[in-house]
Image (tube, rainbow, N blue to C red):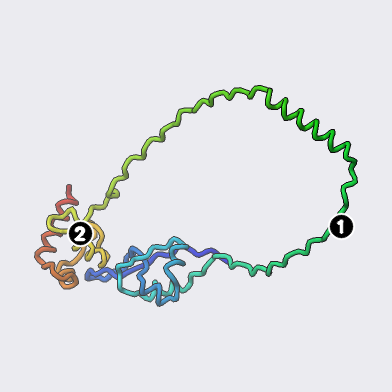
């Protein structure tokens, strides 16, 4: 079976030109529509967007092409216990004199073992444990991107609503239409979005 190629989910931008751009992951609706499972996508290392509610036919078509590359378990044959062969009992024909001699030898060996001093154990030298250097903290933001919450008055709740629309950073917000965003996000006015876009431009010029 051929291995699955890496597929990329796409969504329509809320901007005026409604251009296609890369999504954060496949939505739950697209996965269900394609007849696939979340476990399969995780197994194939594909991204899942749990917050996006939209469904795009192109993404559904791509998901339908996925195949589970896991090997099917072979059916095991039922276990059959092997019959043990019974060996006929053979009486011990050894002479009693030999047994007495063996007992005497065993007693002598036991006494000699008690008299012999136990070897002293040498102390094991512990090697100093080398401490691995702690990895430096990764920068929170990648080069060229700025968090939405860096704008004044834009909290995590509003940032989450923007991310659901596909706007994940300042560089993307500056390209959007404030009128359309105000209609899509409840509780945020068009003037407020214009103010944020103005701040975005100032941040990008620095």
Q: Residue at x 37, y 68 (%)?
A: 26
Indicate the secondary structure of the residue bearing disc 2.
helix
Indicate the secondary structure of the residue bearing disc 1.
loop
Q: Residue at x 17, y 58 (%)?
A: 155
Q: Quadrant of residue 56?
A: bottom left
The residue positioned farthest toward the left in the image shown: 191
Q: Which residue is mark 2?
A: 156
Q: CA distance from mark 1 to mark 2?
A: 83 Å
The nearer-to-camera label among 1 and 2 is 1
Q: Residue at x 29, y 45 (%)?
A: 139
Q: Position of residue 206 (x, y in %)?
A: 17, 47
Give 126 or 52, whichever is nearer the viewer. Answer: 126
Give 160 or 5, whichever is nearer the viewer. Answer: 160
Q: Position of residue 201 (x, y in %)?
A: 16, 55
Q: Are marks 1 and 2 in contact (CB under 8 Å)?
A: no
Mark count: 2
Tell me the number on the disc at residue 88. Answer: 1
Horizontal arrangement in the rendering, residue 19 relative to residue 74 (left or right) = left
């Amino acid at each position: 079976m051929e291995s699955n190629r890496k597929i990329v989910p796409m969504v329509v931008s809320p901007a005026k030109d409604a251009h296609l751009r890369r999504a954060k992951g496949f939505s739950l609706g697209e996965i269900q529509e394609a007849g696939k499972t979340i476990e399969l996508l995780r197994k194939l290392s594909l991204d899942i967007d749990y917050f996006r509610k939209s469904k795009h036919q192109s993404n559904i078509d791509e998901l339908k092409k996925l195949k589970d590359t896991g090997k099917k378990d072979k059916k095991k044959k039922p276990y059959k216990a092997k019959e043990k062969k019974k060996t006929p009992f053979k009486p011990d024909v050894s002479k009693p004199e030999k047994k007495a001699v063996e007992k005497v030898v065993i007693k002598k060996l036991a006494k000699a073992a008690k008299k012999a001093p136990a070897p002293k154990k040498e102390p094991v030298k512990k090697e100093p444990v080398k401490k691995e250097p702690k990895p430096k903290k990764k920068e929170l933001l990648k080069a060229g991107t700025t968090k939405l919450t860096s704008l004044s008055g834009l909290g995590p709740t509003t940032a989450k609503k923007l991310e659901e629309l596909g706007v994940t950073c300042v560089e993307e917000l500056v390209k959007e239409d404030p009128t359309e965003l105000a209609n899509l996000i409840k509780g945020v006015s068009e003037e407020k979005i214009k103010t944020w876009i103005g701040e975005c431009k100032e941040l990008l010029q620095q």
